[in-house]
Amino acid sequence: MMRQYELVERVTRYNPDADEGLLNKAYVYAMQKHGPQTRASGDPYFSHPLEVAAILTDLHLDDATIAVALLHDTIEDTDATRTEIDTLFGEEIGKLVDGLTKIKRLDLVSRKAKQAENFRKLLLAIADDVRVLLVKLADRLHNMRTLYHMPEHKRGRIAEETMEIYAPLAGRMGMHDMREELEDIAFKTLNPDAYETISERLAEQREDNAELILEIEQTLTERLAERGMAAVVKGREKRPYSIFRKMQQKSLGFEQLSDIYGFRVTVGTLEACYRVLGVIHTTWPTVPGRFKDYISTPKQNDYRSIHTTIVGPSRQRVELQIRTITMDRVAELGIAAHALYKDGETGGRNIARHTEDCRAYEWLRRTIDLLAEGDTPEEFLENTKLELFHDQVFCFTPKGRLIALPRGATPIDFAYAVHTGIGNTCVGCKLNGKIMPLVTELRNGDEVEIIRSKAQTPPPAWEAIAITGKARAAIRRATRESVRTQYGALGEHILKRAFARADKSYSEELLETALTELNQASIADLLAAVGRGDVSAQSVLKSAHPDYQDDRAALTSPMPEEGWFGLEKGAGLKFRIPANELDEAVRDHVAKNDDPYGPALPIRGLSGDIPVSFAPNGGAVPGDRIVGILTPSEGLTIYPIQSPALKEFDDQSERWVDVRWDIDVDNPERFPARLSISAVNEPGSLAAIAQTIGENSGNIDNVKMVRKAPDFHQMIIDLEVWDLKHLNRIINQLRSRATVSSVTRVNG
């Protein structure tokens, strides 16, 4: 066990100005508090916080963080209190110790909902000071090193938690050495057979390739010396878990792996990195597509290095990494490397200040910011894990701004990474100047230009396409808000008409009085519930006007011969012809004799202000006389008045909504229609039909063969047209074709 003076010497070796009094006091206090306590191994319990402190001295952290490491278990496992630690060591250290105590109580491998909420608490605990995370990672590393002393049933849980949470967090913070060690120990625990097999194969290759490694080291060192460059060249082999992960991801056998060995070349200056690259590429042949420059485009965790793969002396692929001494320190220590002492400053505030500009810290802060965005804990955990485990791809805005995203990201993720407002208004994209689908997977170096429209609302389907937590959360928020707004607008329209028909006054004050009885929190909630069909307009009427009596006569089912599908029995049904298709005299008549209960609900297609869908098996187009049917939790379905499906709703008058077309001539929109076509069964008949539709600016959405005979076939074609005139023109043109025997419009 490390002695008191040894710990102080380790700290003063890299920080001569360290507060030795603080370190000595923390050492003595923790040793006294833990007293006779022992660990599962039988060692004194105090050996654990001491080893955690030792790990942090290797990271060259400040004396306050080392003191916190010594004290981090005192509140949890001894009679020490937060007040006592605040008094003896200051409020700053007391707050850090308290944060670590809360983290220790979290179970991150419980059922998903609890695990997700605990992960939130973990990130919130490290939100204010990154040192909490650094101490926790060191604590976990020492616990993993002594994991074999734990009961077997606990090892798997701890190893799983390490693999899912702590190792990825260490990687995201740029602490690759720590991540690799955590992963290897967890891998050995969770899959001992695979670990042993890979370790044995590595040992065999290590003996066979010892001379190869030495040869490359010596050759490269000599070549660099000849050009006046001092460099440290060091060979290494990949760790078992890194090899296992690559075998799993690429479905390779051990014999197929080509880059088990890697070399790190460390030089003094940035310019020397690229000079070394030239020497390497002129000494050995390179492997195409295996060059990465993380100096010009650093990873999001601040990792900077040049990677290249060459074919070595024994025709074996070898990866080389070229970096400066500073880059090497950041690559090994990650965010801890930013905890430097500048201008003679010491203390925690200095660390916090120097980590503010760290890319890894930026990711941490952004992830924590998502906690306030309204995601459920499960969604937050899922999205954060996706970002923890994904590699990265680097893209550029048209102005040259670098955007780092997880590998597999799409332009949708890119848009939200730039700004939430850009993502919400995104309608398309250009990749390297060429218009591409929004589902295109981005590649390193792509220049992404987002095409926007103020009228856009992100479709819910985007959530399945996006892979970043920020994009998914923003899409969910925008979708919820859009749907709520749409249902609210529809609900308000329904209520105003219902109140007018009943000859009752309508106001927000009256609705306010009905909220409690209808179990609604606000007027907006009530309007949305009415729009969704969860609350009926009659219920609101009765609550707002207790004296209201519904004296409507009960509807009787019409006889089959009565009227056009019996639609004249539909209470409140009103047919309207689009105003732009009426002559002036008729428009004047409509204006003078308009509906006394308010105008019909305007319909502009699928992207308007109310939740609208069109009737299946036929749809509706501008020019059709239409009616809306309200379906609970689905909104309005628009049917043409000639649709046989309307007969099903004859006895449900409360679901009928008076609607009219309100087409925006400046923003034309296509609408769905369906045709049934009988055509001669001969080569080219289908092509002729498609050509006719295309020549008349129709857009075919789907084609289905319904019946096929030797001399003719019948097909159903779903297409999109501008309006009824456009549809009729297409029908007439199709009928004029010699290969077409009949064309009829289908109304489901």
Image (tube, rainbow, N blue to C red):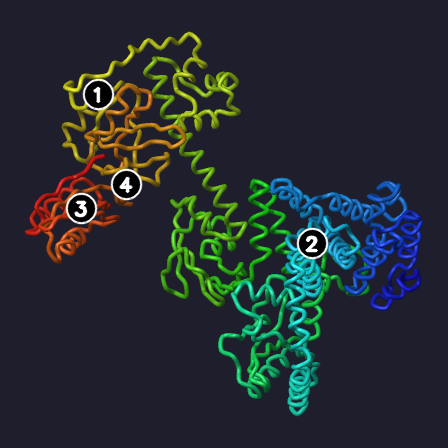
Mark 1 vs mark 3: which is more N-terminal? 1
Foreground of the two, 280 or 417: 280
Q: Could you say which quadrant of the image residue 269 lies in?
A: bottom right
Q: Which residue is mark 3?
A: 715
Tags 4 and 1 touching, CB below 8 Å: no
Mark 3 vs mark 2: which is more N-terminal? 2
Q: Which residue is mark 1?
A: 593
**Is the residue 743 above or below the residue 55 in the image?**
above
Foreground of the two, 454 or 112: 112
Q: Element under label 2?
A: helix
Mark 3 and mark 2: span between their CA atoms? 60 Å
Foreground of the two, 302 or 178: 178
Q: Element under label 1?
A: loop
Mark 2 and mark 4: span between their CA atoms? 60 Å
Residue 13 % position (x, y): 86, 68
Q: Nearer the viewer, mark 1 or mark 2?
A: 2
Q: Note whether residue 349 is visible.
A: no
Q: Nearer the viewer, mark 4 or mark 3?
A: 3
Q: Amino acid at mark 1?
A: Asn
Q: Which residue is mark 4?
A: 664
Residue 477 % position (x, y): 50, 41
Q: Nearer the viewer, mark 1 or mark 3?
A: 3
